[in-house]
Every structure is written in structure tokens, then in C-alpha cells.
Amino acid sequence: MSRVSFVPVSEWTDELRTFAAADSATELELGITRMLAHAPELAMGPLSFGAAMVTKRTLPERLIELLRLRVAFHNQCRSCMAIRYRAASADVSEEDVCSLEQPQQAESLDDREKLAVELGDRFACDHLSIDDPFFGELRALFSEAEIMELLMHCALYVGVGRLAAVLDMTEDLPAGFAQPFGVDHVVTPSSDTPVLVR
């Protein structure tokens, strides 16, 4: 059970309801917005950031989805791990998702994907190791604009993913992802059948 109550869509501000396309979204697609609605004006900040990262990104959908799922594992964000976005679903198989357990050995990941996942690992678990030599590795495979895009994705996934994990929003998830939050209950993005969302 989520640690903060869901605000019914009927009580959301018009701006929030319209922005989230709440009248046509599933409960899972509404996700954390149901709790952010307690502070609707503030909610527009992270929601707008997330929307910009979807609509304005230039990096491949596959690379971003692999990065997102790897950071979700570090966050232990059950809802983040349980969903697959339609835009990337044709490019990311469940075998690819399972390969994220040991991404540097994954034959299905290319060099850019492996480095992006390593950036996600470091950002989530050891951000001070993202030093000048590592930026040199990034510059060898990505433009500076792409590096900034990757870093902003990391910031979004680490920050909002940890918020979602702390809120323990699991009631709409398949059983394998709905295990209690905590260090004794580690789940992976392949713990159950994922749910496809828009």
C-alpha cells in the first residue's frame, strides 16, 4: 500500500488533469501523479521535466530504456521496473532487460549502451566516480549535447525513481513487482511480466 494516499482524479486541478491526460490514462499510467496531486503546483515541475525528456530527447529509445531500467534496479523502484514504454518496446526485448544484470558482458548491448548504463550505475551509486577520465570515455562516444541529455535522464530517473520507491507505490503492479520495499526484498526488472504503457 502506498505510503501517501492517492488523490482522486476528480479532485485534481484542471492543469494537472489535462497535462497528465488523466481522463484517458490507466491507473498505472497515472502512477506517482496520483500522490503528487497533493501539491499540484509543485507537481508540474517534475512532470514537465519528465515530459520534456520524452518529447525532446535525441538519443535512441532503446538506449534510454536500458538506462532507465538499470537505474530503476538501483533505486528498487517497483513501478519503474514493472513498466515498458511502447516507444521502446520493439527495440528492447526481455532478454535485453535480463542482460542488464551484467551489462558489461551483454553481447546484445553496443558500446554506447554499455557506457550509458555504466553512467547510470555511477550516477545512482557512486556519483563522485564520474570524473575527468570517465568524461573522456563519454566524449569518445557521445557529443557534449548527448552527454548532457544522458545526465538529465540520470537525474530524472534517480530522483523521481527514489521518490516512487520511498512512496512504495505497488498496488497496481504484477505480483512479482509488488513485494514489500526494503533491503531484504530486492527485485529486478525481470521479476514478473511487465506492463506496456504509452
Image (cartoon, helix red, strand yellow):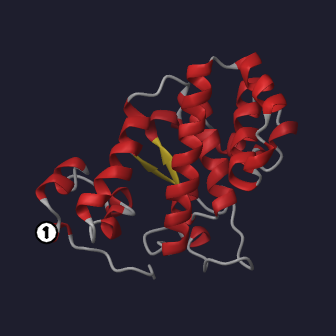
Q: State whether residue 154 appears in this view.
A: yes
Which residue occupies 68% across, 45% down? 97
Where residue 93 sits in the image (x, y, percent)?
Answer: 63, 39
The residue closer to the viewer here, 32 or 196, is 32
Where residue 35 sits in the image (x, y, percent)?
Answer: 34, 70
Where on the picture, by quarter, is residue 117? top right
Residue that badge 1 annotates? 10
Q: The C terminus appears in which quarter of the rendering?
A: top left
Q: Farthest residue toward the right?
A: 105
Where residue 161 sits in the image (x, y, percent)?
Answer: 54, 58
Q: Secondary structure at mark 1?
A: helix
> How many marks overall?
1
1 versus 145 height, above or below: below
The residue closer to the viewer here, 12 or 128, is 128
Residue 163 horizontal side relative to residue 36, left or right: right
57 versus 104 height, above or below: above
Q: The N terminus appears in which quarter of the rendering?
A: bottom left
Where residue 18 sits in the image (x, y, percent)?
Answer: 17, 50
Q: State whether residue 91 appears in this view.
A: no
Give the residue type at disc 1.
Ser
Which residue occupies 33% across, 65% down? 36
Which residue occupies 29% across, 52% down? 44
Which residue occupies 61% across, 69% down? 176
Where on the picture, by quarter, is residue 68? top right
The residue closer to the viewer here, 44 or 70, is 44
Residue 5 horizontal side relative to residue 100, left or right: left
Mark 1: give few (<14), some (14-19) or many (20+) Cα within 10 Å: few
